[in-house]
Image (spheres, rainbow, N blue to C red):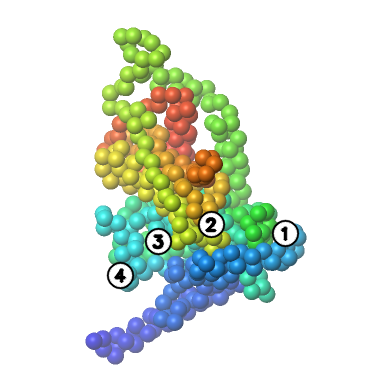
């Protein structure tokens, strides 16, 4: 039993945590309660419960149609233009959430993998939920009972790992805020740290881009403008502008739109020449070089039936669930290809092209598209299949960079289409390495 001195110190520590949480959260128009009825810091359950309150979503699938009908009536509350919306600062959206892996064995079990580490797919789910709440914090109108905005994930611009080890029995802290705003889009930056050896140390940095739409998620809606209040916030905003410009340039240079560069064409032809059979010297006769794998043999596929349990607050499949499934499939592919457990280096350019409806057949295809030294670049493509019409529609494209403890074989394209995947993978890998430098 703790003595009186320990009880007093525990009470003081708890009060200090509550005061710090309340001080930071009270600055926001929208907040999660700084402490629960048990005196703890807000966690991911609080985040998701608050999101349901904001949009009026029901926890029961049977009520979803009524909830969506009620949301349609909120269209009249949308702003006609950005100039009529109050200006917000980064402090208005600042959010801090804790994941008590060290103190709550029940939560720890959900995040634990068979390597006695943390399932990174679960972290992706949490980051997605947190990004949505941060953006609702920026746009919240305290005079309204529910938000007329539908805020959804447009893309994950970047997730950079600052530490490869995530301990399964140490508490995690997420912090984040809005750093850039357009007319209908919002950039949110988040940071994850973990308490170990008496202090919190950084684990990852993430940048998400969210878009605001009307209550029925059919058309774009305006969001509050952002005002920088200091040098750091001004720098963040300028970086947001640069990120937008960079994404536009990358989109214009996409291999699905324009031909490869001269250097890339030379590289593809060199790969082709290296696979020619010297005995036949024929275009149709190809030989795999030493320590290499044909790209078509570096693929893993999966299928998910999209059940209501995995829905988000707008009754479509939760984007975090899609990220988790894609990551785990990509990780499995990198593990099989490299012959050992891979470590994640970066998540790059996850594009959400189309929402996934409840009941869809979600087909996932993971492809090792580029390797270099100890690194494996994996692309995961997801699409929904309508079993009645047999139509396929791409929903997401994911890019993951992994590192293993030994040199891996070279992946070699055989067709022109595979060569484009190879070049696209090399582009993403080079961009990641520049960011790591």
Picture disc at residue 82? 1
Q: Of the residues under marks 3 and 1, which one precedes in the sequence?
A: 1
The CA span between labels 4 and 3 is 19 Å
> Which quarter of the figure is the C terminus placed in?
top left
State the SS at label 1: helix
Q: Nearer the viewer, mark 3 or mark 1?
A: 1
Q: State the separation of the CA atoms marked 4 and 1.
A: 46 Å
Q: Which residue is mark 4?
A: 105
From the viewer's perspective, is residue 44 above or below residue 361?
below
Question: Which secondary structure, mark 4?
Answer: helix
Assign the N terminus to one quadrant of the image: bottom left
Q: Residue sitting at 38 percent across and 41 percent down?
A: 301
Q: Residue furthest bottom?
A: 4
Residue 120 in view of the camera: yes
What is the CA distance from the residue labelled 4 to the residue labelled 2? Answer: 30 Å
Q: Position of residue 249 (x, y in %)?
A: 60, 38
62 vs 1, left or right, is right
Q: Which mark is residue 68?
A: none
Left of 262 or right of it: where is 298? left
Q: CA distance from mark 2 to mark 3?
A: 30 Å
Residue at the extreme left of the image, as rendered: 1
Mark nearest the camera among 4 and 1 is: 4
* Circle number at residue 316: 2
In percent of width and height, residue 197 lies at 29, 65
Quick one: SS at disc 2?
loop
Q: Secondary structure at mark 3?
A: strand
Q: CA distance from mark 3 to mark 1?
A: 35 Å
Task: Tell me, yes or no, whether the two marked residues, 4 and 2, touch with CB atoms within 8 Å.
Answer: no
Residue for badge 3: 193
Q: From the viewer's perspective, is the residue at label 4 or at label 2 nearer?
A: 2
Q: Residue furthest front?
A: 388
């Amino acid at each position: 039993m703790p003595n009186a001195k320990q009880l007093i110190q525990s009470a003081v520590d708890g009060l200090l945590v509550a005061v710090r949480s309340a001080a930071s959260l009270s600055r926001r128009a929208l907040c999660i309660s700084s402490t629960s009825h048990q005196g703890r810091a807000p966690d991911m359950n609080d985040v998701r419960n608050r999101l349901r309150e904001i949009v009026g979503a029901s926890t029961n699938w049977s009520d979803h149609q009524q909830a969506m009908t009620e949301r349609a009536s909120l269209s009249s509350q949308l702003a006609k233009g950005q100039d009529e919306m109050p200006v917000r600062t980064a402090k208005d959206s600042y959010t801090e959430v804790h994941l008590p892996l060290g103190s709550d064995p029940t939560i720890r079990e959900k995040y634990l993998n068979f390597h006695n580490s943390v399932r990174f797919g679960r972290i992706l789910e949490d980051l997605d939920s947190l990004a949505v709440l941060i953006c609702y914090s920026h746009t919240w109108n305290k005079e309204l009972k529910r938000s007329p905005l539908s805020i959804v994930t447009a893309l994950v611009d970047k997730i950079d790992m600052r530490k490869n080890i995530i301990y399964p029995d140490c508490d995690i802290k997420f912090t984040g805020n809005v750093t850039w705003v357009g007319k209908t889009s919002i950039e949110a930056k988040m940071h994850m740290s973990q308490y170990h050896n008496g202090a919190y140390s950084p684990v990852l940095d993430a940048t998400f881009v969210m878009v605001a739409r009307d209550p029925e998620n059919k058309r774009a809606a305006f969001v509050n403008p952002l005002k920088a209040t200091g040098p750091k916030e001004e720098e963040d905003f300028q970086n947001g502008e640069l990120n937008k410009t960079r994404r536009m340039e990358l989109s214009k240079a996409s291999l699905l739109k324009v031909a490869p560069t001269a250097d890339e064409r030379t590289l593809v032809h060199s790969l082709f020449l290296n696979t020619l059979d010297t005995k036949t010297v024929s275009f149709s006769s190809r030989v795999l070089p030493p320590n290499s794998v044909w790209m078509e043999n570096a693929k893993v596929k999966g299928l998910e039936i999209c059940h209501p349990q995995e829905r988000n607050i707008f009754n479509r499949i939760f984007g975090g669930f899609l990220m988790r499934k894609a990551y785990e499939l990509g990780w499995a592919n990198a593990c099989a290809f490299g012959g050992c457990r891979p470590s994640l280096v970066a998540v790059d350019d996850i594009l959400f092209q189309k929402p996934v409806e409840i009941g869809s057949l979600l087909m996932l295809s993971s492809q090792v598209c580029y390797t270099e030294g100890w690194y494996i670049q994996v692309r995961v493509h997801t699409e929904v299949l309508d079993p009645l019409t047999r139509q396929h529609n791409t929903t997401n494209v994911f890019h993951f960079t992994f590192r293993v403890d030994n040199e891996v074989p070279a992946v070699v394209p055989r067709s022109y289409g595979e060569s484009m995947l190879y070049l696209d993978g090399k582009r993403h890998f080079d961009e990641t390495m520049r960011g790591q430098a």
